[in-house]
Image (cartoon, rainbow, N blue to C red):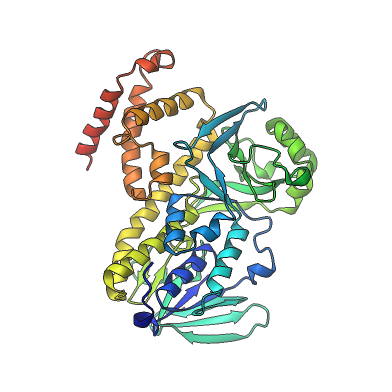
């Protein structure tokens, strides 16, 4: 992390939104010497649980760790993260199947969204040149005159501010992005997944005991829907049910069909019987927590003029099925910091480069996340899918430099851009689809010519540069 206090001490950055990415960005920029003010419409996270009932636990992976360590706070976050070394699959009969994520000791890390946000705010607020302003809602932005109007959500009072530099880190329904949508040639799309989600809960056992394997991400795949569970530091698990919002010809089970407690009880008993003893209060939790939607947002450009830009979900909100939403936002901060180094904080050069490097990556991880939902929901329990993963693992073992599984490229290889992982992954899929069509593959896969499989991929890579 570059520290250039003298050069940047006169520069001021206004961040709209004090969530995960906004808080990390404030640390990155403050350590570069900028004066930073963060405005957040919610109340101070340190005094309340702003995420209660609406949180999907997060999976922190290498791209996120890269950014945190570059900001000098990696060790501070390690204390609130639990490593998960693989998926633990729960079938309808309660039988368990374990799938490691990568090589030995490679893990993604479960973190509480609220707990992580609080810690980042604490770390940012400890810096002398960062100030947080809670209960402040952005009402209006004048792009031409670099002015923002804030409204205090508790008192109703408004204030006007002229900004030097400004960043929209205000999430999927960003006020800044909404303002940019009214500018010329701004591309924007918002697409809701047909599925929504509801948070459930598995409490800790006696003395904070974990009632399931602690170091795994638990999945109950049921083809058209699924339940997942991630561990918390107190021994509990945060569970999330992903289910069609409304029933149709493709999805017979849906939230709109679960209107009464008897409906819910019958649904859970039918599909998640082994989870019932672990969450005895699931009916009351079901009634307390809302059904929430899942949206993908794409837009371009992410920058406006010489002093304004989008970052994180405000620029590229994605569905959570690759566990990369937060990681992608943190990587935005990491790449922006690299560009600031390269351009010596010349924002006329910085913003075009940031735009050039990150928009395609935001689009790529959106595509990857949507595809991984199908894999997690429909395929992870299928014998042929498990065989395919076993074959790919064997190829990687024999040719580690020539075949890296897509999941490893995305999750454990931050040096590979999302867009490149997507490109290579599609070519690997073409090759493996042909491999899996070979007669009697289930019994004779050990006899495959693994070198020829790698060669087929290399030929495709040369053609599809």
Locate the C terminus by quadrant: top left
Which residue is painted at 49% across and 80% down in the image? 129
Which residue is painted at 35% across and 59% down in the image? 358
Q: How many marks?
A: 0
- The quarter of the picture where residue 390 lies is top left
Q: Is residue 301 visible?
A: no
- Above or below, 231 against 463 in this view is below
Where residue 330 sits: x, y (%)? 45, 59
- The quarter of the picture where residue 189 lies is bottom left
Which residue is painted at 33% across and 18% down in the image? 448
Q: Is residue 48 left or right of residue 147?
A: right
Viewer-proximal residue among 447 and 78: 78
Where residue 194 sits: x, y (%)? 55, 45
- Above or below, 131 against 256 in this view is below
Where residue 394 sits: x, y (%)? 38, 26
Where residue 357 sits: x, y (%)? 31, 59
Viewer-proximal residue among 268 and 335: 335
Residue lying farthest left? 463
Which residue is painted at 48% across and 45% down in the image? 322
- The quarter of the picture where residue 89 lies is top right
Residue lying farthest front? 75
Q: Is residue 318 visible?
A: yes
Q: Is residue 163 left or right of residue 237?
A: left
Viewer-proximal residue among 455 and 244: 455
Q: Is residue 55 left or right of residue 176?
A: right
Locate the N terminus by quadrant: bottom left
Viewer-proximal residue among 84 and 160: 84
- Above or below, 194 against 300 in this view is above
């Amino acid at each position: 992390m570059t520290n250039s206090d003298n050069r940047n001490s006169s520069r001021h950055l206004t961040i709209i939104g004090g969530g995960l990415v906004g808080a990390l960005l404030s640390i990155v920029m403050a350590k570069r010497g900028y004066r930073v003010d963060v405005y957040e419409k919610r109340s101070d996270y340190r005094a309340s649980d702003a995420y209660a009932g609406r949180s999907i636990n997060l999976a922190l992976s290498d791209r996120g760790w890269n950014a945190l360590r570059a900001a000098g706070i990696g060790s501070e976050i390690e204390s609130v993260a639990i490593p998960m070394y693989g998926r633990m699959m729960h079938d309808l009969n309660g039988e368990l199947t374990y799938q490691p994520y990568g090589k030995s000791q490679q893990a993604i890390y479960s973190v509480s969204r609220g707990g992580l946000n609080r810690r980042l705010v604490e770390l940012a607020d400890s810096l002398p040149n960062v100030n947080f302003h809670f209960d402040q809602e952005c009402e209006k932005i004048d792009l031409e005159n670099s002015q923002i109007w804030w409204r205090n959500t508790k008192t109703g009072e408004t204030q006007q501010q002229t900004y030097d530099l400004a960043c929209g880190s205000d999430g999927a329904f960003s006020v800044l992005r909404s303002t940019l949508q009214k500018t010329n040639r701004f591309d924007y799309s918002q697409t809701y997944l047909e599925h929504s989600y509801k948070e459930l809960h598995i409490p800790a056992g006696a003395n904070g005991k974990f009632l399931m394997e602690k170091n795994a991400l638990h999945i109950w795949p049921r083809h058209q829907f699924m339940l997942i569970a991630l561990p918390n530091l107190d021994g509990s698990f945060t569970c999330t049910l992903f289910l069609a919002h409304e029933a149709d010809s493709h999805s017979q089970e849906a939230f709109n069909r679960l209107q009464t407690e008897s409906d819910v009880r019958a649904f859970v008993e039918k599909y998640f019987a082994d989870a019932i003893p672990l969450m005895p209060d699931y009916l009351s939790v079901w009634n307390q927590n809302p059904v929430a939607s899942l949206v993908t947002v794409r837009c371009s450009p992410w920058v406006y003029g010489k002093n304004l830009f989008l970052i994180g979900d405000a620029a590229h909100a994605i569905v959570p099925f690759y566990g990369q939403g937060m990681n992608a936002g943190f990587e935005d901060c990491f790449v922006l910091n690299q560009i600031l180094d390269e351009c010596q904080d010349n924002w006329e050069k910085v913003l075009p480069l940031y735009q050039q490097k990150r928009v395609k990556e935001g689009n790529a991880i959106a595509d990857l996340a949507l595809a991984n939902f199908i894999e997690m929901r429909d395929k992870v329990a299928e014998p042929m899918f498990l065989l395919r993963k076993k074959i790919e693992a064997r190829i990687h073992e024999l040719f580690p430099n020539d075949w890296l599984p897509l999941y490893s490229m995305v999750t454990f290889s931050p040096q590979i851009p999302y867009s490149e992982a997507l490109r290579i992954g599609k070519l690997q899929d073409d090759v493996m689809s042909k491999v899996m069509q070979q007669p009697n593959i289930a019994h004779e896969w050990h006899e495959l010519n693994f070198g020829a499989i790698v060669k087929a991929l290399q030929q495709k890579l040369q053609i599809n540069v």
